[in-house]
Image (spheres, rainbow, N blue to C red):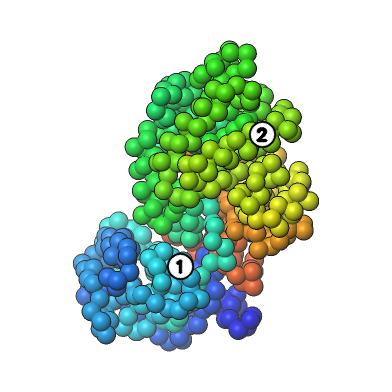
Amino acid sequence: LALVAGLVVPAAQPAVAADGVPSLARVVPAPVSVQPANGVTFELRPWSVLSYDPRLPRARQVADGFAAQLRPATGFPLPVVPAVPGLTPPGIALQLGGGEQLGGEGYRLDIGADSVRIKANRAEGLYHGVQTVRQLLPAKAERTSVQPGPWPLPGGSVTDYPRYAYRSAMLDVARHFWTVPEVKKYIDDIARYKINYLHLHLTDDQGWRLAINGWPRLTSVGGATGVGGERGGYFTQDDYRAIVAYADAHFMTVIPEIEGPSHANAARSSYAELNCDGVAPPVFTDIYGSPYSTLCLSKEITYRFLDDVIRQVAALTPGPYLNIGGDEAKDVPKDQYRAYVQRVQAIVAKYGKKLIGWQELTGSADPARTTAQIWFPEEADSPAIADASRHGTKLIMSPAEHAYLDMKYDEDNPGYPVGQFWAGFIEVRDAYEWDPETVIPGIDVKSVIGVSAPLFTELVFERPDVDVLAFPRLPAIAELGWSPAAAHDWNSFRDRLAAQGPHWDLTGVGYYRSPQIDWP
Ligand code: TNX
């Protein structure tokens, strides 16, 4: 075993022990430390109980959710009961504690012959611990009909907590619209990899996807179509609330993105008054036509519009962040761009949210109150970003050449229409082999709050395309966000990723069977 900084790193452990029970280390993202207890195996039994500590808010919800997942395949009743002090019933116990090093999201997992104990300071940690246990159970536990046992788990202990507090997936619902059930399924599938933010790209040139009271044409016109003139659609405010609630049940926070000043054609085509010439252009249905469609920056109505939108979106969003876009405003003079960003930042602050935007707004926004998402390092103003990082700006890393899930995997399949390649072809290893702290030279590395895996959907046509692009690359980005830098190891990741395949097969995730991975 490799010992790094006193931690047992899972890299050197085989994926499956001799008795067919998986190694305790067979988890994505790799845990901070794993100590197997060789020869010890727990088995879930017909009489197993799920207990939870009632002092921990939402622990019961985590226990209920886990029991509901396990009942169909095991056929066991798995009652959920509040724990009695000093007594651990046979089964799985969700407990309060585990030490300060776990923070809010970490957990400690102890698997013994008679019980599985997950300890955490908060329910988030219990939830992440449950995701680890789900990966260690036989994949058939995912089935929805009763399966023959046994239901073993490998004995030992895991101590685990995230490298970064921010681990997001971005879904573009503007270019191609995805319905509430389609978004919920994505939440199900990414929550397993300890993703804790869902960033929704709600507006762009080709579509406006959230109903805003007082501005009905945004959805009736701006939401009526999408790329290729294909299906339109939009979320009512109740739909959006349902997504927020569903994400929250998976301990995931929604970040809404309202694009401006460019990528705003859907809004312009909905309301003539948002155009300097007072004429509404048609909605874009192409990709490359004229990608920098900009709101009229010199009209006050533009800012009244944005105030109305941001007020409503902020009120619908319990999370702390609101993303205002800000990318590719290539036809806007620098001083006007800066004035726009500052006005919009003031609106975001007025409605109690923290501003996130793409890398371009670094230097225009107030550095102390801004989070910038890096997407195109080659075009980034690195000195300005480095300077902002030393003046309070937080950074999210999603370099397109590694983290953009809309890029094709390889060039072997020219007839395959799904995905782009402007940032390169991204095989699984390319998605995995990078370091969030060296993407932009000269930054204060403490400013990096995490990573994101964006899925833009210009060339993502149907829901199965989402799966093929996101899996297995999203778990690679998730591991960069969660696992300690010292655990980064391609060969280990390959083995652990391969073990996810059977789980995806049984949960309806149509992943890409990358030739780089020895799928079972
Ligand atoms: C660049 S990422 C864009 C998006 C496109 C994406 C396609 C970003 C800030 N701008 O508008 O959808 O490339 O890969």
* Mark 1: secondary structure: loop
Pick whichever, 75 or 413, lies toward us: 75
Q: Is residue 39 above or below residue 30?
A: below
The residue that mark 1 highlights is 104
Residue at 36% x, 60% y is: 142
Whole-percent x, y for residue 143 in the image: 33, 58
Q: Which residue is mark 2?
A: 339
Image-based side of 319 in relation to 429, left or right: left
The label nearer to you, 1 versus 2, is 2
The amino acid type, in three-letter code, at marker 1 is Gly
Q: Nearer the viewer, residue 310 or 202?
A: 310
Instruction: Name the one closer to the observer, 508 or 189.
Output: 189
For the question of whether residue 329 can be seen, the reply is yes
**Quarter of the image containing the N terminus?**
bottom right
In this image, 362 relative to 247: left or right? right
Q: Is residue 277 above or below residue 311?
A: above
